[in-house]
Image: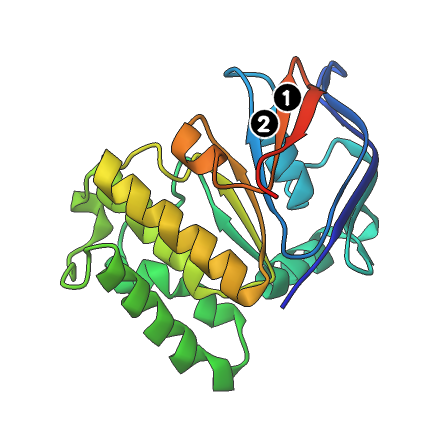
Amino acid sequence: MSMSLSVTGLEVRSPRGRVLLSLPSFEVSGGALVGIRGPSGAGKSTLLYALAGLLERVSGSVRWGDTELLALGAGRRTAFRAANVGMIFQDFLLFEELDAPGNAGVTALFRPRAERAALRARAEAQLARLGLGDAQRSVASFSGGERQRVAIARAMAAQAPVLLADEPTASLDRAAADRLIDDLVTLARETGTTLIAVSHDLHLIERMDRVLTISDGALTEERSVTA
């Protein structure tokens, strides 16, 4: 399972036309681990959302494998994400009325019937690994750290060829964050998943193959971390 990324002339604008992000080009090979860092408000999350096809005022090219994402209509972009992209959102985006297993396994609803039971089983296994194996109550009662772990289990259970993570360790204590980092890196290495993670956490950044630094909506530095 592997999917490469090619970005050319990417530009994201605000509703008033201000340029929020402008990247001439960069490439990510399939199965690479890429960290994105920079100051708050620099455009890191905007880049991640653009790579997922979640923004409307975007121009340029975002090509995942053989798919030109920005050329697809909204419905086909949604279908592409459901099949190929796991996402860890900074604001979690959980269904308050569902319990932890219901949220972690919600992407099963968008998969063929034959795949649903296995995905739900993976979701419950990830919850157990993250310390939420017995959390059967509604997520409305969960702490921020618990919500983060549910969102992480949901993304990892999908076993998609691409995993996009927005500050995945932000709401976790150090021990839980380090366990998550190990899980993310192990998952990506073992399955060939292309992982792109926005983070201020140096423990996560130093485990990546490459690091992009974004400042004022532009790529200001790129470096290799590991051999």
Circle 1: element type: strand
Q: Circle 2 is placed at which residue position?
A: 44
Residue at x 19%, y 55% (from the top left corner): 131
Q: Where's residue 76, x and y in %?
A: 72, 59
- As drawn, 124 above or below 91: below
Choose top left, top right, bottom left or bottom right for residue 35. top right
Seen from the viewer's position, the closer of residues 77 and 160 is: 160
Circle 2: element type: helix
Q: Where's residue 53, x and y in %?
A: 68, 45
Q: On residue 214, which mark appears? A: 1
**Quick one: which residue is furthest to the bottom in this view?**
114
Dot 2 and dot 1 residues touching (CB under 8 Å)? yes
Residue at x 40%, y 64% (from the top left corner): 106
Comparing labels 2 and 1, the label whose residue is closer to the camera: 1
- Mark 1 is on which residue type? Ile
- Mark 2 is on which residue type? Lys
Query: Can the viewer see residue 94?
Result: no
Left/right of residue 184 with respect to residue 66 in the rendered view: left
Residue at x 42%, y 28% (from the top left corner): 202
Left/right of residue 113 with respect to residue 11 in the rendered view: left
Seen from the viewer's position, the closer of residues 160 and 105 is: 160
Q: Where's residue 184, x and y in %?
A: 43, 52
Left/right of residue 22 with respect to residue 222 in the rendered view: right
